[in-house]
């Protein structure tokens, strides 16, 4: 198959690229710079120069592929308008596609589109209540669902971690460099987690499934608290556990308004992915995720 991926150098996108290449698919990626293009070439993908903020000729090329995977966001204050502009461009190009042309279209949402739910695990049947800075995703998803040429699957990952990248690796770096882990809001905040490699396998299965209107949660473990993760990171690093709790406002100043999401306490289940697609994550404990992430961050 020929797969087009946005966000090919990102935490999620790079794992997706590697997963499809590993099984022999051709992968084309969107590259906004020479550096991004070089990284993607190094993975084995074919980069196409362009950007989310300027959906030009590359959009037509993207829809010539057998599947389109959207795994990118700018995380700037204008990320919603950037995404809406891209969606409009995709829908405009799709108007010229033959009626029988159907493209698996995978859109990456996230657990932060769900409400705070620290007790009952969130399922796909839960009503959405996004963090305000990500509410724009609902509009993008709704617009994409109207296109008869797109077989839309929406995947909502938990917090994604990888070797030396993501939430857990950030904790490890904070402990090593500053002597403390920074926690937003409270130490008993619950987070669902998934390893990028396992998440990528779910994307592969979803493309093969060609599901239209399919919604999938993606968490390998339903939750672990900030303190639980922090203590495991400290143990793995061989350092004393020391945490500094900061307010949501402090986090927003440092990262942007979207960082308020780090104070949203959630548990999340992925029964649909398990039951319908046979998804079976390899990293299925928080201990395994910490070991993999911290080991690679050392």
Image: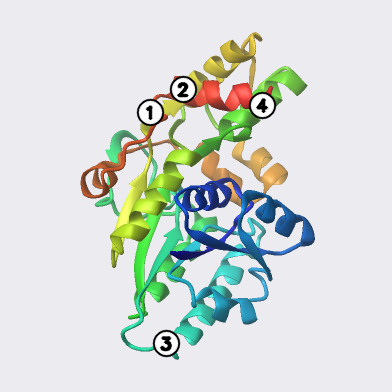
Looking at the image, the residue that sits furthest to the front is 24
Mark 4 vs mark 3: give the one in front.
3
Among the two numbered marks 1 and 3 on one chain, the one whose residue lies closer to the N terminus: 3
The mark tally for this picture is 4
| Residue that mark 3 sits on | 97
Work out whether 73 lies above or below 241. Answer: below
Q: Position of residue 161 (x, y in %)?
A: 53, 36
| Residue that mark 1 sits on | 284
Q: Dot 1: within a 10 Å radius of its alpha carbon, few (fewer than 14), some, or many (20 or more) residues?
A: some
- Asked whether 3 or 155 is in front, the reply is 3
Q: Which mark identifies residue 288?
A: 2
Mark 3 vs mark 2: give the one in front.
3
Q: Secondary structure at mark 3?
A: loop
| Residue that mark 4 sits on | 297
- Left or right position of 247 against 107: right
Q: Secondary structure at mark 2?
A: helix
Alpha-carbon span between mark 2 and mark 4: 14 Å
Q: Position of residue 60 (x, y in %)?
A: 55, 81
Alpha-carbon span between mark 2 and mark 1: 7 Å
Alpha-carbon span between mark 1 and mark 3: 41 Å
């Amino acid at each position: 198959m020929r797969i087009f991926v946005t966000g090919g150098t990102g935490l999620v996108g790079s794992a997706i690229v590697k997963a499809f290449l590993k099984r022999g698919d051709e992968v084309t990626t969107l590259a906004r710079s020479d550096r991004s293009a070089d990284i993607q070439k190094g993975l084995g993908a074919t980069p196409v120069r362009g950007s989310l903020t300027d959906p030009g000729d590359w959009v037509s090329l993207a829809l010539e592929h057998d599947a389109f995977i959207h795994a990118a966001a700018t995380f700037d204050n204008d990320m919603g308008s950037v995404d809406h502009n891209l969606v409009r461009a995709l829908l405009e190009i799709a108007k010229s596609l033959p009626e029988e042309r159907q493209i698996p279209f995978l859109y990456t949402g996230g657990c932060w589109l769900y409400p705070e739910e620290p007790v009952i695990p969130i399922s796909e049947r839960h009503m959405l209540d996004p963090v305000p800075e990500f509410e724009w995703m609902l509009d993008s998803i709704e617009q994409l669902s109207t296109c008869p040429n797109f077989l839309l699957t929406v995947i909502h990952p938990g917090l994604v971690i990888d070797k030396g990248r993501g939430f857990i690796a950030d904790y490890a770096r904070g402990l090593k460099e500053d002597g403390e882990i920074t926690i937003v809001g409270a130490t008993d905040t619950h987070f669902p987690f998934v390893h990028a490699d396992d998440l990528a396998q779910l994307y592969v299965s979803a493309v093969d499934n060609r599901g239209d209107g399919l919604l999938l949660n993606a968490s390998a473990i339903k939750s672990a608290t900030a303190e639980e993760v922090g203590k495991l990171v400290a143990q793995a690093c061989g350092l004393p556990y020391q945490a500094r709790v900061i307010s949501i406002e402090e986090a927003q100043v440092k990262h942007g308004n979207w960082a308020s999401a780090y104070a949203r306490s959630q548990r999340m289940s992925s029964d649909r992915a398990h039951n319908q697609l046979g998804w079976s994550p390899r990293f299925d404990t928080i201990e395994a995720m910490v070991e993999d992430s911290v080991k690679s961050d050392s």
